[in-house]
Image (cartoon, helix red, strand yellow):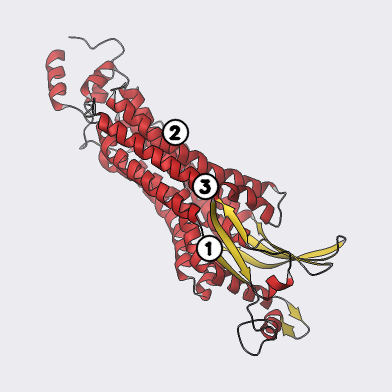
């Protein structure tokens, strides 16, 4: 008995089992494999360069009236200098977290990708490894979000009379290279996932009639799954939109510098305007770099999460009403893509860590910056020690600058939205992913008898 028309590779889609060990590079063209491995090498080089270069610079601008002003750099924020700064300040948590996610995890992820590409492993091992490193890849962006928060915190402008003083952060090549490397890493991983599905489930995917017959769908007619997914999605979107539109967090400034700069006041941000506020807060507010960061912010924080919340009930609808396997498989792959790019959880962790430790980081940066300024035989820090500080011998007996972060209701609503999204995404990945490619042994045996 011949196979149905258009089903020449049906055996490729029927005979795939977990015990079949395949290395991806043996199943794709030499050119394709060469390009992927070359991009992974380029990715490592970009991460190494980004970690070696300065990521941001702190500037002070002094001016008189609207005509005369001068700016000078007072501190460099690179990976090593930032770690030393935070660690010396006692902010050990955020210091080691950034070191782990910015300096260790990118290389571990690349090694895992190379292993999944070159080493023969079972389908299940590769599938879940690729999914795992893809969903965790976004955590490398913690450094970028902390730079955004730090840039907003340093947005201090004003002065008494005609005197003008401003603090600002300038993003430099290091942080741009790092973000580029993180995006490239995400893209390579998702391409590897696509190749894995192509290799494991036939050249033409799972669109053949024979392939569809051999794949069981255990959720047909089980409307409760779709109703539950739709309800959780609605709750997640409601919490997210509500939390994004009300106050998210605020900076409360105090200290001698705040008293001197009369234009500085407490600032409150919503999650919706945080991205657009960052370019205005930086030293080069009209540059393309901060605008690029703003674009990425809205992609990672709004577009991807909203797409994910909408996609999950859609895919359950397709399962419950037994849509074509090709549609279900494509939708599951789409959920995997948007879940990898949705990063409000990374922003929340960066802000949560900053809430506890941002002020001591700023205090330490002021100390480091003032040490680089000398007036006659005195360093800037020695002058500051006599002018402001918490000691009784200081002139003003108050801190030079204190920036405390206060979390508002919007922050906690977004955290609730993230938890609900996790509650949807993780079960969807666990329950549906194996079912897309799980064969029915009874149907396979029956088809073998028919074709023999």
**Nearer the N terminus, badge 1 or badge 2?**
2
Residue 189 appears anywhere in the view? no
Answer left or right for 343 relative to 377.
left
Comparing labels 1 and 2, the label whose residue is closer to the camera? 1
Q: Tell me the residue that label 3 is attached to.
A: 244
For the residues bearing labels 1 and 3, Cβ distance under 8 angstroms: no
**Residue density around tag 2, few if under 14, some if 14–19, many if 20 or more, within 10 Å:** few
Query: Which sits in the foreground, 47 or 347?
Result: 347
- Residue closest to the far right: 67
Please provide percent x and percent y for residue 137.
43, 48
Residue 16 against residue 356 in the figure, above or below: above
Residue 280, above or below 229: below
* Count of marks placed on residues: 3
- In which quadrant will I find the N terminus? top left
The residues bearing labels 1 and 2 have C-alpha atoms spaced at a distance of: 50 Å
Look at 47% across and 63% down and name the residue there.
353
- Residue 89 visible in the current orientation: yes
Q: In the rendered image, which residue does mark 1 sit on?
A: 406
Residue 332 lies in what quarter of the image? top left
Q: CA distance from mark 3 to mark 2?
A: 42 Å
Whole-Å distance between the Cαs marked 1 and 3? Answer: 16 Å
Mark with earlier residue (1, 3): 3
The residue at the point 14 percent across, 27 percent down is: 441
Which label was assigned to residue 32? 2
> Residue 102 placed where, x, y %?
48, 57
Which residue: 28% across, 30% down?
A: 436
Split into 4 quadrants, where in the image is the C terminus? Answer: top left
**Disc 1, disc 2: CB below 8 Å?**
no
Asked if the residue under mark 2 is in contact with the one under mark 3, i.e. CB atoms within 8 Å, the reply is no
**Residue 366 in the image: above or below residue 337:** below
């Amino acid at each position: 008995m011949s196979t149905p028309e258009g089903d020449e590779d049906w055996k490729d889609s029927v005979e795939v089992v977990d015990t079949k060990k395949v290395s991806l590079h043996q199943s794709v063209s030499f050119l394709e494999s060469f390009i992927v491995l070359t991009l992974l090498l380029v990715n490592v080089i970009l991460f190494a360069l980004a970690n070696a270069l300065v990521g941001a610079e702190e500037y002070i601008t002094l001016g008189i009236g609207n005509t005369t002003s001068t700016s000078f750099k007072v501190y460099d924020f690179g990976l090593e200098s930032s770690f030393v700064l935070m660690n010396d300040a006692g902010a050990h948590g955020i210091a080691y977290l950034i070191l782990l996610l910015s300096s260790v995890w990118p290389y571990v992820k690349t090694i895992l990708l190379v292993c999944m590409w070159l080493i023969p492993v079972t389908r299940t091992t590769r599938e879940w490894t690729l999914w795992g490193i893809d969903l965790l890849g976004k955590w490398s962006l913690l450094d970028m979000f902390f730079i955004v928060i730090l840039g907003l915190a340093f947005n201090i402008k004003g002065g008494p009379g005609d005197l003008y003083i401003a603090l600002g952060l300038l993003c430099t090549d290091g942080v741009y290279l790092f973000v580029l490397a993180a995006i490239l890493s995400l893209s390579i991983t998702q391409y590897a996932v696509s190749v894995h599905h192509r290799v494991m489930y036939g050249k033409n995917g799972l669109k053949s009639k024979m392939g569809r017959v051999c794949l069981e769908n255990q959720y047909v007619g089980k409307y409760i799954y779709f109703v539950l997914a739709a309800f959780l999605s609605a709750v997640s979107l409601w919490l997210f939109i509500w939390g994004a539109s009300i106050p998210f967090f605020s900076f409360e400034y105090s200290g001698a510098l705040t008293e001197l700069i009369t234009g500085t006041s407490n600032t409150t941000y919503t999650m919706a305007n945080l991205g657009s506020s960052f370019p205005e807060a930086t030293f080069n507010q009209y540059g393309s770099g901060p605008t690029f960061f703003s674009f990425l912010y809205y992609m990672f924080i709004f577009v991807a999460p909203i797409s994910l919340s909408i996609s999950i009930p859609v895919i359950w609808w397709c399962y419950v009403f037994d849509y074509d396997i090709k549609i279900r498989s494509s939708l599951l792959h789409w959920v995997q893509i948007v879940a990898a790019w949705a990063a409000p959880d990374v922003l929340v962790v960066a802000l949560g860590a900053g809430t506890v430790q941002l002020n001591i980081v700023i205090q330490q940066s002021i100390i480091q910056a003032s040490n680089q300024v000398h007036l006659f035989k005195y360093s800037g820090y020695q002058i500051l020690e006599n002018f402001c500080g918490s000691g009784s011998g200081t002139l003003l007996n108050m801190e030079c600058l204190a920036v405390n972060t206060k979390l508002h209701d919007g922050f906690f609503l977004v955290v609730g939205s993230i938890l609900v999204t996790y509650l949807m995404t993780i079960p969807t990945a666990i329950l549906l992913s194996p079912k897309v490619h799980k064969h029915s042994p009874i149907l396979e045996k029956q088809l073998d008898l028919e074709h023999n």
